[in-house]
Amino acid sequence: MTTPAPHRLDVRPSLAQGQDPFSQIMQAVDGLQPGQPLLLIAPFRPVPLFNVMANRGFSASDRQLPDGGWQVEFTPIAGEAVEEGLAPGSAPGAALWPDPARTLDLSGLMPPEPMVRILETVDRMAPGEVLFATLDREPMFLFPELAMRHHEWAGNFAADGATYRLLVRRGN
């Protein structure tokens, strides 16, 4: 079986227009074929994205381009699989985490309030403690923040499809 050609995504035009390309990148990742790499072109080395992609089961290989931009190939790591029922990017082994020490119902709040409250709460928790939160939508912009702060997360939509359930385990 041959590996599909990398999906090329150049986010420089989006950034030049003042847009955050994170959702565009995650849509591209979600649309990849099994085993297909993502070839990302950016005007800078996207270091925070490395942790996000590692949590999704990708390795990274980067190089600077002659024009000063960066090319990063994110390649799926063989054998990495998301646990049944969890969203891509969820931490492996989340089912083995301790019971949540804190719970937040963030239903009805407009962004960025849910993200702010989650980050404030996690900052007050002890390393290894778990937070459980319910939200009205998947908190896509929260995930890179959690990765940068070395926290793990696991989440999915409830059966009703309207509530996003999120576990966050505080890092060290």
Image (cartoon, helix red, strand yellow):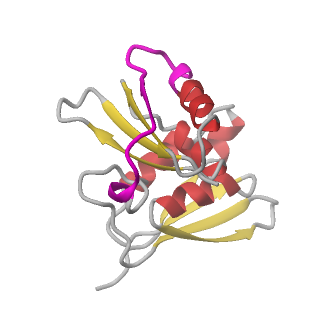
Residue ranking furthest to the bottom: 1
Q: Position of residue 165 (x, y in %)?
A: 34, 36
**Lateral position of residue 153 relative to residue 35, left or right:** right
Q: Position of residue 22 (x, y in %)?
A: 56, 43
| Rendered image quadrant of residue 41 | bottom right
| Rendered image quadrant of residue 133 | top left
**Point 72% across, 71% down: residue:** 63
Task: Name the foreground residue: 48 vs 75.
Answer: 48
> Is 104 part of what is drawn in magenta?
yes
The reply to whether residue 8 is in sight is: no
> Is 172 part of what is drawn in magenta?
no
Magenta residues, as a range?
94-114
Task: Name the foreground residue: 14 vs 145.
Answer: 145
**Lateral position of residue 163 relative to residue 93, left or right:** left
Q: Position of residue 79 (x, y in %)?
A: 36, 77
State whether residue 34 is above or below residue 49: below
Q: How many marks?
A: 0
Task: Name the foreground residue: 8 vs 121.
Answer: 121
**Point 45% across, 15% down: residue:** 109
**Point 63% across, 34% down: residue:** 124
